[in-house]
Amino acid sequence: MVDGSGRGRPRSESARAAVLHAVDDLLVEVGYAALTMKGIAERAGVGRQTVYRWWSNKAEVLYEASAIDAREELSVPRSGDPRKDLKAYLDALVGFLAHSHAGAAYRALMGEAQHDAEVAALLASRDILGESAAEVVEAVRQPSDTPLSLEQATALLIGPPFFHLLTGRSADDLDTEQLTEQFVRALNPPGT
């Protein structure tokens, strides 16, 4: 069988979806070090070559799955109240990083990036968390007189819970209401 270019077998979107659904669940079960392309293929019910058609290594598979899930899990409906939207986003972010399999995948990649330049480059290629926060951040940043860029303001919002959770602290210790108020005050300091 040949694809439209006349080479090889056509790519099966259902096989691709099975791989993306399998990878973060498998990561939670076996950990990043024990995660293999063979194991991913077996969990997805596809051949190893099927996995290699789309991705070069386990980090790429994990990153794509995490990005897709993050887009869904971090998308919060807008209420029209920027503070409520910020809090809802922070609640979703904490849930993603602390409890979601996709969040576990993202955290594993962050850890691996500390000593693997290819994984670091993969994470640097796209700011998954920054993209997810941009709309709620911009709703507060735009009307303020802050000199902070969107990227800087986003880092100010995401940074505290991200650091808290990545350093092994409990999600239960995070007060997203307080984080929301701190963020709004930082963008709108008294006397401005």
Image (cartoon, grey):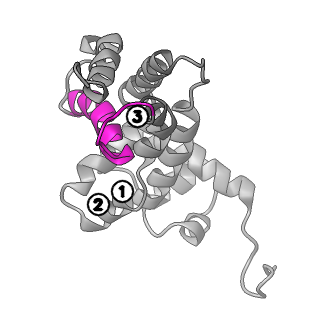
Name the image quarter holding residue 95. top left
Write down the region rendered in magenta.
Answer: 143-166
Q: Disc 2, disc 1: CB below 8 Å? A: yes
Which amino acid type is marked by label 3? Arg
Report the residue at 78% width, 79% height from top: 3
Side of 90 relative to 9 (left or right): left
Q: Residues within 10 Å of mark 3 (few under 14, many from 20)?
A: many
Q: Position of residue 152 (x, y in %)?
A: 30, 44
Report the residue at 81% width, 79% height from top: 1
Report the residue at 31% width, 15% height from top: 181
Q: CA distance from mark 3 to mark 2?
A: 29 Å
- Magenta region includes residue 130: no
Which amino acid type is marked by label 1? Leu
**Viewer-closest of 110 and 179:** 179
Q: Which residue is mark 1?
A: 123
Q: Residues within 10 Å of mark 2 (few under 14, many from 20)?
A: some
Q: CA distance from mark 1 to mark 3?
A: 25 Å
Res. 120 mark: 2
Select label 1 or label 3 by which is in front.
3
- The secondary structure type at the circle numbered 3 is helix
The answer to whether residue 106 is above or below residue 145 is below
Q: Quadrant of the C terminus?
A: top left
